Image (tube, coloured by chain):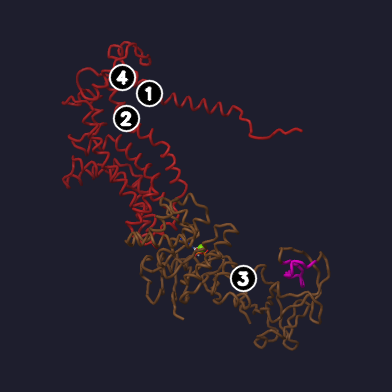
Chain colours: A red, B brown
Amino acid sequence: MSSIPSGPRPKYLTVGRIGMYCFILVCALFFLMPLYVMVITSLKDMDEIRAANILNLPKELSFYSWPKAWSQACTGFVCEGLKPGFFNSIKITVPSVIVSVGLSAINGYALAFWRFKGAYFFFGLCMFGAFIPYQVMVYPLLKIEDALGIYSTLPGIILVHTIFGMPILTLIFRNFYVSLPIDLFKAARIDGGNFIKIFLYVIIPMSAPITIVAVILQVTGIWNDFLLGLVFAGRDNQPMTVQLNNIVQVDYGVAEYNVDMSATILTSLVPLFVYFISGRWFVRGIAAGAIKG
Amino acid sequence: MKSSVEVKNISFSYGKTEILNDLSLDIKEGEFMVLLGPSGCGKTTLLNCIAGLLDLTDGQIWIEDDNVTWKEPKDRHIGMVFQSYALYPSMTVEKNLSFGLRMMGTAKDLINEKIKKAANLLQINELLKRKPSQLSGGQRQRVAIGRALVRDAKVFLFDEPLSNLDAKLRAELRYEIKKLHRDLSNTMIYVTHDQIEAMTLADRISVMKDGLIQQLDTPKQIYNKPANLFVAGFIGSPSMNFLNAKFDKSNQNIIVGNKQIDISKYENINNMINDQKVVFGIRPENINIEKNENSIQCKVELVEPMGADTLVWTSIEGNPISIRLEGSSNFNLNDEINISFDINKSSIFDSKSEERI
Ligand SMILES: Nc1ncnc2c1ncn2[C@@H]1O[C@H](COP(=O)(O)OP(=O)(O)O)[C@@H](O)[C@H]1O
Ligand SMILES: [Mg+2]
């Protein structure tokens, strides 16, 4: 008795599949090349960098550029490395992320469930806000902050990041909440929840995936920001990116490429770390928000 | 008897689309009221208006002699059960049950006591520590009913609570809901599009269509004396047979094509006028196979054995007619049969107004 075909279908390596792997490999190499150059350059000393090809592996490993970038390199007149910038960036990022994500979640919740008068207008406003280039608003904002007396201060830069983050985050949260079953909200209202209680006890516990997406977007966006930090943070609160720029753009002496590379890698560690620990959640959250709304 | 829920001339619109218009409904204390109607006729909308989840455009809602028209859902002494269960996914069954009480700031001991009582009543004791995702559909709906129970609601609102369950579970839970009503004797308002549920559960049924109440009466009355053509066709499965006919006053006959049916025994025959165009309706079980002076001869066209009953299909002047017979009856295709109608159990409607005569 001929019983073929039967059972699981055998897996063949098709031409399409091979092509796909090749494509993925090329992409990976393309994006890894700069990282490769950065890492090996940071591990060479200056003589070797000047002497040899940029792609060659270091003959002798030298690690001195790393501590130098962290705590000794000169950023303008002071030579304390990136360390102060790192802590400034933390001081800017943490409150900005908490405030902008928290407020956006409440806004999105109100837009999705409480259908107040003018909700559609507000929704349109968010769309608008999310898509105008923020450079347009830098100067007016600067004037406003100046008038409020918070220009060039930590609260000043936190406020700016919160303002620029909220339109898009509000949309993201609103779309996620619209996709939740409305009956849950109705049940909670009958069970005695008011605006705040329903948000705290029913909505927030279901918001994990979308909150993770929002946090990732904000952490990377704020950490990587250069322009707003340069304009609004003030000399005492310059974020890591601004100090990195100061290290790389030396006005006198010789350029130390190994220190530059170490400093660059150090600066990008936080967003990289965030992506690595949360990539899975990120995809899941995006998908959850994207299906409906 | 005292009223429990009074819906007074309410209107509701979604934007410009009017869903309910000047609808009134008076539900007695302890009554099991079923809102029955096809999908999209506004049952859920009406229930949500009663619950306070939608704002009326006009009219009033009274619950237990209290005008609650502008009150929040939580202040209306109601409990509600949804088709989608709507259990809070992040909370255990126990937390789901206690959520309303916790929101009201009820004392811990009292909460535990009430949960125990509800859990016993619904046999969900073993499930208290589980999350909703770890429950079957039937278990979820039990928990949802329990959540309404613990709140000591005066009125229970059910929105198609059994529609997502399979047939066996549906029958089981239907029985339990009926028992619950017998034991608690709260007022219950129950929305469904399933006429079996409506017939079995209701003290009174209000049949709805396009946001209007077509008939409000006991299941028996609605089944035996449907108020109009829509109700007659909607209630009953297999559904009522209809024949378009003309009334002949002198012979007390209705004429279908070239066949005549004697309706002299029809209760309201005096309200009919000569040559009036009517629709003659007769339920499949009110047709007998017997030969007499009034019987009509026709042919068996299809036989559907259904276990307890057998449905025999034939036709009169091209109109299909189904006849409900005992399961043991034996007919074959193309058999010649003579059928006669139980005229006092028939319904006759005016063709134009579609109202019962
Ligand atoms: N959120 C909504 N916005 C606009 N129209 C709606 C909305 N919900 C329901 N409707 C409309 O209202 C009518 C009645 O709906 P509903 O009360 O849900 O009917 P039922 O529960 O009887 O199936 C339907 O025609 C439906 O399309
Ligand atoms: Mg409905």
Per the image, label 4 sits on a secondary structure element best described as helix
| Residue B344 in picture, x, y percent from top left | 69, 82
Where is mark 3, residue-wise? B235
Give the alpha-carbon distance from disc 1 to disc 4, as whole Å: 12 Å
Determine if marks 3 and 4 fall on one subunit: no
Foreground residue, A137 or A113?
A113
Q: Is residue B321 visible?
A: no
Which is in the foreground here, disc 3 or disc 2? Answer: 3
Which is in the foreground here, disc 2 or disc 1? Answer: 2
Give the alpha-carbon distance from disc 3 to disc 2, as whole Å: 70 Å
| Residue A253 in picture, x, y percent from top left | 20, 18
Where is mark 1, residue-wise? A34
Determine if marks 3 and 2 fall on one subunit: no
Give the alpha-carbon distance from disc 2 to disc 4, as whole Å: 14 Å
> Is the residue under label 1 in contact with that under label 2 (CB below 8 Å)?
no
Per the image, label 1 sits on a secondary structure element best described as helix
- Chain letter of disc 3 in the image: B
